[in-house]
């Protein structure tokens, strides 16, 4: 019998995190535990304010779930069908349930989750480090943290002068390749292509969601002219978005919180590859629990952006480590995550 426990909480950030739509010092979360035959599976849902998913609604969804009718975590697909029958949304809560079930399946099998999934273990995995929007002294502090990483991701927005200033500042101090994320900031396709052409001369490798979701009709135009790979993030939530929108982007950013967990992200990355898309595994501001869960899928992706736990002042979990940008998977079975 599966027994579910969950609790609302907050992650405190050690530094204000600003993107083109908002700035914040806290991220709301829900911690999930599923108990089965003396073992505990851990999961976590995260709710950045710009997501349409809200924590209160996800808490209501979790309180309606009755997992006691399922007699093993290996009934994962049935549990997903049951959750989808209750609601098509509440995907952060579903992601938390999904990772807790994988944690249990690994612990029962005596295998880390990536082995349970039959994935490679030989390749080293590297994550980018993300630099948020901020004043010059903030950017300089972030660059100091980024100096050992092999790739830097930079948050930009609709202010072209800011964008150029920050990239020039970074280029004075750092030579690593860069990816930029506009978080839908540029609301004009001509301004977007001008910006992207300028960036292509600065060792920038890709541009993520330059224009709003509402401008999707203009993305095919932008893609056909862009010297950089255009990745869809806010436009790509689920597998059906990949099917419907794959011609608009060179690549897609897949996140557990957007799609509903490890199983759905696995399905999406295979689908994206079959459609010829490049793939990035991303994250929100999340604790080590959710970042570690995502990292088990890491070998399937072209790019990893799994640094959402590095700016947390009071991370409730232990798990994955990062050294010089390399993801070091935890020892042990399941997710390899434990509560601090
Ligand atoms: Mg993004």
Image: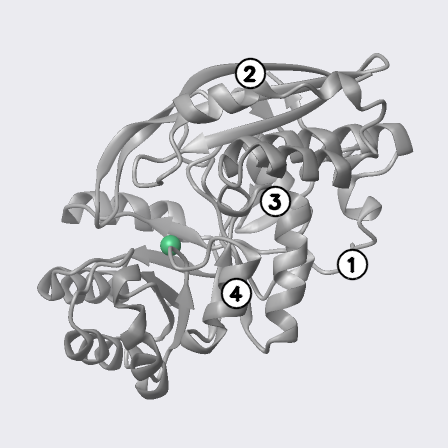
Q: Is residue 169 left or right of residue 288?
A: left
Q: Mark 2 or mark 1, which is nearer to you?
A: 2
Measuring 31% from the left and 46% from the top, which residue is drawn there? 142
Q: Residues within 10 Å of mark 1 (few under 14, many from 20)?
A: few
How far separated are the C-alphas under marks 2 and 1?
A: 41 Å
Q: Could you tell me if residue 120 is visible in this image?
A: yes
N-terminal of the two: label 4 or label 2?
A: 2
Q: Which mark is residue 321?
A: none
In front: label 4 or label 2: 2
Task: Determine the CA span between mark 4 and mark 2.
Answer: 31 Å
Q: Secondary structure at mark 1?
A: loop
Earlier residue among tags 1 and 4: 1
Figure quadrant, ligand 1: bottom left
Q: Identify residue for label 3.
A: 294
Do the residues bearing badges 4 and 2 touch, measured as CB atoms within 8 Å? no
Query: Residue placed at 49% from the left, 34% from the top?
Result: 90
Query: Could you say which is closer to the camera, residue 145 or residue 19?
Result: 19
Residue at the image position 44 percent from the left and 17 percent from the top: 9
């Amino acid at each position: 019998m599966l027994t579910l426990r969950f609790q609302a909480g907050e992650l405190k950030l050690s530094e204000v995190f600003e993107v083109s739509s908002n700035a914040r010092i806290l991220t709301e979360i829900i911690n999930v535990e599923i108990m089965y035959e003396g073992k505990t599976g851990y999961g976590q849902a995260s709710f950045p304010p710009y997501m349409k998913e809200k924590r209160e609604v996800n808490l209501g969804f979790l309180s309606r779930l009755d997992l006691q009718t399922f007699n093993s975590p290996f009934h994962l697909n049935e549990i997903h069908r049951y959750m989808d029958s209750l609601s098509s949304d509440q995907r952060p809560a579903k992601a938390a349930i999904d990772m807790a079930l994988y944690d249990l399946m690994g612990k029962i099998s005596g295998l880390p989750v990536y082995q349970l999934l039959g994935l490679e273990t030989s390749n080293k995995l590297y994550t980018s480090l993300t630099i948020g929007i901020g004043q010059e002294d903030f950017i300089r502090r972030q660059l100091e943290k980024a100096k050992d990483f092999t790739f830097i991701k930079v948050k930009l927005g609709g202010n072209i002068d800011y964008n150029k200033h920050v990239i020039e500042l970074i280029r004075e101090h750092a030579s690593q390749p860069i990816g930029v994320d506009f978080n839908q900031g540029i609301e004009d396709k001509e301004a977007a292509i001008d910006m992207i052409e300028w960036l292509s001369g600065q060792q920038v490798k890709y541009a993520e969601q330059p224009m709003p979701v509402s401008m999707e009709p203009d993305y095919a135009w932008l893609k056909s002219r862009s010297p950089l790979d255009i990745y869809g993030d806010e436009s790509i939530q689920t597998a059906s978005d990949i099917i419907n929108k794959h011609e608009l982007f060179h690549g897609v950013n897949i996140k557990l919180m957007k799609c509903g967990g490890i199983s759905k992200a696995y399905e999406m990355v295979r689908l994206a590859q079959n459609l010829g898309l490049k793939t990035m595994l991303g994250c929100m501001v999340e604790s080590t629990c959710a970042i570690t869960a995502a990292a088990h899928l890491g070998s399937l992706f072209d790019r990893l952006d799994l640094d959402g736990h590095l700016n947390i002042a009071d991370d409730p979990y232990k798990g994955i480590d990062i050294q010089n940008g390399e993801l070091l998977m935890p020892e042990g079975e399941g997710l390899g995550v434990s509560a601090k």
